[in-house]
Amino acid sequence: MVTADAAEIHQAAQALLDASLFSYQGEPIGTRAALSAGIAAENYVDCFIRDFVPSGLVFLFQGRAEIVRNFLRVALRLRGLQEEIEGHHRLPRVMPASFRVERDGYGDEVLHADFGDRAIGRVAPVDSMMWWVLTLQAYVNVTGDAALAEEPAFQRGLQSILTVMLNDRFEVFPTLLVPDASFMIDRRMGVYGHPLEIQALFFATLNAMQELLTPDQTTSTMLELAAKRRAHLTEYVRQFYWLDPLKLNEIHRYETEGFGHDVANPLNINPESIPDWVADWLPDDAGYLLGNLGPGRMDFRFFAQGNLLSMVFGLSSPEQNTAIMQLFDQRWPDLVGRMPVKLIYPALVGVEWQILTGSDPKNTPWSYHNGGNWPVLLWPFVAAALRAGRRDLASNAIDVARSRLYRDDWPEYYDGRSGRMIGRRSNVRQVWTAAGFILAEALLEQPDRLDFWDASIHL
Ligand code: GLC
């Protein structure tokens, strides 16, 4: 058994993060997803936009802002690189899932990006454009360098992202409609529709636009729309996504088939759709935001990243934040267990697994996205716990993670009900695991570091 002290473990995480940096034209521009050779999928040498977020925040807090600036510029430039995907004009080109640097036949460096046209399952990375905006917001706030966001190329990028986000399709909800597998959960998991994680990112991005996009004749109208949408979204999520024992009782006794403006059950949710596990599992003084919501559909599964980001960005109310942390406290073995944090609770099993994942062998019950434990969630957990005044939980979670992550060489995910085993097909030397750990420690040390993202502080 390897034993190491906290300083040694911190240094090991930092060494992995630094080793993952790669350059373009002599400048560091991104971090690889994993440094483990062997079982890793081919694209783990790429820098994923979403994976870079904890790395970028660490660099910003360590005074290495130039790396983040380079990353932001390169990712923006990549938008122009993509050939048309037949029949699509704009959406797939907004921001790639990942990019890498390769050498061409002459030995020159070339940037390559994946817009979902090469990814396993051909999934559209809807979250990338939003994480890019939030990384820019972090950069501007930490460095004070507002001039970067004011550059014409950045303003054009922001404007086209906002256009895509506000684009009306066939929707009557304030939430954003996305396909399955379009965010951190990038395989089929029954998350199409209005998944919570996307709504939290949507909320935060609408908010960031008010700070980053310069108002002019065109953008003023867009910013007004963005502000209205954000207000409507906040109210909708706080009211309709929220589940606590009181609300559960209400749903249990819902009348259905109501028509008109003022019905109690506008989405026509059938009480029969409440899964068996919910009523006994939900503690009296706790609550959480549902995973997904649509006509006749409530996904009762607990999605950690969506709940945590809602807290970090200020989408959930302070009372809701207290109740979510209470849930973590009371259901610690299920939601944290041997490795913070369980991505989704509970796992899909049997016919549900067959139908909703397409019998995906990587997503068997209590593995990978289907109920695995993901150490990268440590940083949003710590940020959310601190925001809700639960320093005790934040510091306990870091203690649970510390020695195991080091001993196991920074795995991507863990398997089992309590996350006891290293994931069956998990990478080791996974970079966002290490970056997330360093970030979690930095947040515990200085809890207000992410306040620039909290809408409730600005509003
Ligand atoms: C997996 C994860 C995804 C992550 C990628 C690279 O596909 O599901 O969220 O970005 O690995 O680490």
Image (cartoon, rainbow, N blue to C red):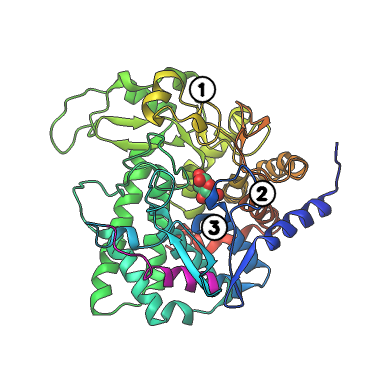
- Nearer-N-terminus badge (3/1): 3
Q: Is residue 319 visible?
A: no
Residue 253 is covered by the magenta coloring: no
The 10 Å Cα crowd at callout 3, few under 14, some 14 to 19, many 20 or more, is: many
- Nearer-N-terminus badge (2/1): 2
Ligand 1 has an atom within 8 Å of the beta carbon of the residue at disc 3: yes
Q: Position of residue 242 (x, y in %)?
A: 40, 37
Q: Position of residue 95 (x, y in %)?
A: 40, 62
Which residue was labeled with disc 1? 281
Could you say which disc has been placed on residue 353 in the image?
none
Which residue was labeled with disc 3? 46
- Nearer-N-terminus badge (3/2): 2
How far apart are the alpha carbons under marks 3 and 1? Answer: 40 Å
Label 3 secondary element = loop
Which residue was labeled with disc 2? 36
Label 1 secondary element = helix
* 447 relative to 152, above or below: above
Q: Position of residue 151 (x, y in %)?
A: 42, 81
